[in-house]
Amino acid sequence: MIKVENLFVKFYIENQVVEALKGVSFHLNQGEIVAIVGESGSGKSVSCNAIMNLLPSYAKVEGSIFIDDKNLAELSKEEIRKIRGNIVSMVFQEPSAVLNPLIPVGEQILETVLAHKDISYKEGKEIVIQAMESAKIPDPEKRFYQYPHELSGGLKQRVVIANAIVNKPKYILADEPTTALDVTTASGILALFQELKEKQNIGILFITHDLGVVAQIADRVIVMYKGEIMEESDVYQIFDNPKSQYTKNLLASRVHV
Ligand SMILES: Nc1ncnc2c1ncn2[C@@H]1O[C@H](COP(=O)(O)OP(=O)(O)OP(=O)(O)O)[C@@H](O)[C@H]1O
Ligand SMILES: [Mg+2]
């Protein structure tokens, strides 16, 4: 389980302090999809980045983050490196921002394998092909050698997902992974996340602006506003019987937050 307890994040920039998170607590189990929704600037990405220890050095973090009962604050850099991309991986909005345009996509995924395992190119490549198959990339043997610009946006995002699952993680943190895609492509990616949850028992933290996406994919929902959690409920409760006024307003304003 990933457990976030009473997390505060402040950014100190020049004379200003931005309080991005003001005491946030939540958890993510394996085999479930938890959506975080909230308007821009509510602290969704900061929550995700804190779990991955990816906040800039000028961020002050208080509170605790546990990954399978290990307190992140007590781990060495090397131990955190082993967790990242191995136990917990991330998928972002823009695959092009993550993929290196100069390296064939399969080799990029292979780098992720070889960063954590001491095996040969051939063994590694087999693992990569399997991950590409799990990510439903057609003709993975051919795609392995292609460059990002040869793939569609949806296929690029599948490559990023193949890269995220190649080391068999327990958890994926997905920060608006379908926002940059058209509706049809996005729904294919949502179906893939569902399958990864069901078949590989991966726990997925899914950040989105889109309540339609929440309804389609989430088991539980966390509603954030200005660095605080307004409400946390199962997905039926959020739509049928929202507790907080903020959630009610969100539903009334429909789909896009
Ligand atoms: N690296 C940073 N340096 C300074 N302030 C930051 C940084 N990252 C985030 N913030 C601030 O922290 C707050 C929360 O930002 P965050 O990126 O988590 O919002 P978000 O909910 O992900 O929004 P969006 O939907 O636009 O992605 C915002 O006020 C933002 O300006
Ligand atoms: Mg964000």
Image (tube, rainbow, N blue to C red):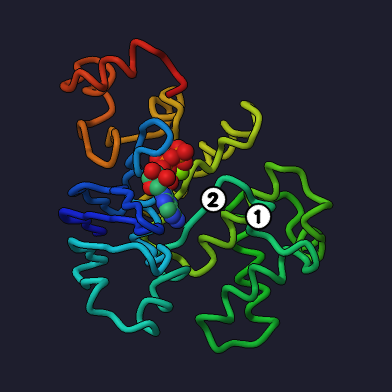
**Residue 216: image x %, image y %?**
43, 27
Q: Residues within 10 Å of mark 2 (few under 14, many from 20)?
A: many
Does 233 sit left or right of 172 as displayed?
left
Regarding mark 2 in the picture, which secondary structure is present there? loop
Q: Which residue is mark 1?
A: 97
Residue 205 in sight: no
Q: Quadrant of the N terminus?
A: bottom left
User: Which sits in the foreground, 138 or 93?
Assistant: 93
Residue located 35% across and 62% down the image: 59
Residue located 54% across and 50% down the image: 92
Regarding mark 1 in the picture, which secondary structure is present there? helix
Does 102 sit left or right of 198 as displayed?
right
Does 164 sit left or right of 129 as displayed?
left
Q: Amino acid at mark 2?
A: Phe
**Residue 75: image x %, image y %?**
28, 80
Q: Amino acid at mark 1?
A: Ala
**Residue 183: image x %, image y %?**
62, 26
Label 1 with label 2: CB-CB less than 8 Å:
yes
Residue located 21% across and 23% down the image: 237
For this orientation, the residue located farthest to the front is 15
Residue located 77% across and 61% down the image: 101
Image vertical order of residue 158 relative to residue 108, above or below: above
User: Which sits in the foreground, 39 or 51?
Assistant: 39
Image vertical order of residue 153 relative to residue 101, above or below: above
Does 41 sit left or right of 130 as displayed?
left
- Tell me the tag on residue 92: 2
User: Which sits in the foreground, 77 or 124?
Assistant: 77
Image vertical order of residue 212 relative to residue 88, above or below: above
